[in-house]
Image (cartoon, grey):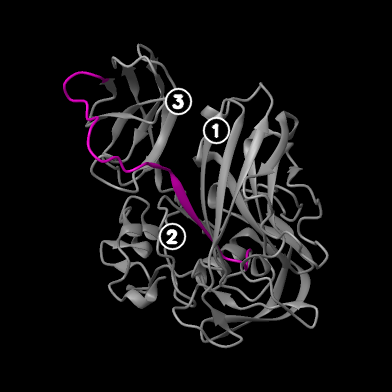
Amino acid sequence: MKKNIKCLCGLLLLGGVFSFLSCRHMEMSDDQWREIVQGNYPVDSIDKYHTWDLLQDRALTLRVKIADPNIVKVQVLNGNPYTTDSVEVLAERPCETGQTMNPTFKVPNVAPTLYAAAVNKDGRYYVVPVGSSTDVTIGGSNVINDGTLHQPIYQTFTYMFEEDYPLPGDFDFNDIVLRISQHALNDSTLAVQVTLAAVGSTSQIGAAIRLPQVSIDDVKDVTIEEGSRFDEGYTIGRYFISDDEIVSRGRDGSAVINLFEDAHWCLNAEEKMGQVVRKYYNTLKYEVEDVAAMVPTVTRTFDVHMKSSVNANYLSLADIDPFIIVASSGMCVEVHTYSHKYDEALWNYTTGSGGMDDRVPWALMVPDATFHYPREGVTMGMYRDGQISGAYSRYNHSFGQWGRNRNASTDWWLYENATKPLVY
């Protein structure tokens, strides 16, 4: 079946970069479009069943038997906070001693060593190793509760976007880099923390986060802990996110947190002759006048206050849908991770899902708070015609091999190329 799609045609391949010469509507079959995209993706022979997911499901039964009457919660951790810093909280539930909790949660596909902890109201941790067990008692002689505690942080994912969807780009996945975590402040308040880490583009890019599990009708309001928006005081008319409120109603009725209208302005609120200065920010390891600069990252924490119909403790970071918004062929186009690739959060821009699926992602999520994204112009990983290269190209631990086989090199994100300048 053929579909009308809006595309840029007259494709001219020059040195591996597309020059788009003219725009028009044209009839193109699904197979023809797929051939164009896959023919210019850094990885050939893509696994047709790929989901581009680096997470796996876990479930535990936690029995709290601590002789401390002030226990208030349990946590699942990816390390022992008495011996390791930057340990992450993978799951958290309100709990008292004597209770049993059954958290389900996501862990990286390279399974971490898990620990369970009961925490009292003063922040004291009682920690036990989980090992291979799925039924864990927090209590007894194996409890660790003394020494220097390194305060755990909440699980953080790194989201990286290409701006050219649905057209092939350079696939360095650094046009926008966001680091996102979330946790429940109480039963009715979800804190979503977002750090804008890099902008590897010279075009205006907006961003938002859809909460698929939260209806806008269940949200009272959203406040910002830092007191101001990413783009507070933005002096140019809003285009991508026309709603000036912090939260909008998504096309499916879900809540959408409006992050920013213009990523460049958020990192460096500089204008010249009424135009926002657009440099590559934090994607090159050196400054180039009027081209690139290193600037501080910017963080905002959005507190989503909900009605009693939603319990914030049971909302998962793995379920959120961060996306960017770009201008393409006179339309506002959203770029989502693969699992939400055809989910129109705010804008109607697709011709439908399924048949047009080219099986490649324009956005990636890596379950790592400090993941080293590629520097400007370096692909995440290339594997074409038997040649492997790019930022993550170690043999048997490469992005390209993972792209060809979803069950191979699943740990690629832990093995950057030994040539450090390829990543930031």
SS for callout 1? strand
- Residue 7 visible? The answer is yes
Specify start and end residues of the magenta stretch as a single range. Answer: 138-165
* Three-letter amino acid code at the position of disc 1: Leu
Magenta segment's dominant SS is loop
Residue type highlighted by circle 2: Ile
- Residue occupied by mark 3: 93
Label 3 crowd bin: few (<14), some (14–19), many (20+), radius 10 Å: some
Figure check: 126 above or below 149: above
Counting from the top left corner in percent of width and height, residue 218 is at 71, 29
Residue 157 location (% of width, % of height): 46, 50
Say above or below: 19 vs 146.
Answer: below
Q: Pinpoint residue 204: horizontal percent, then vertical percent.
A: 69, 69
Q: Is residue 14 magenta?
A: no
Q: Earlier in the sequence, mark 3 or mark 1?
A: 3
In front: 82, or 377? 82
In the picture of the structure, the residue carrying the numbered disc 1 is: 185
Q: Amino acid at mark 3?
A: Arg
Disc 2/disc 1 C-alpha distance (Å): 42 Å
Farthest-out residue, front: 122
Q: What is the spatial separation of the Cα atoms under label 3 and label 2, in whole angstroms?
A: 40 Å
Residue 202 in the figure: left or right of residue 251: left
Mark toward the viewer: 3 or 1: 1
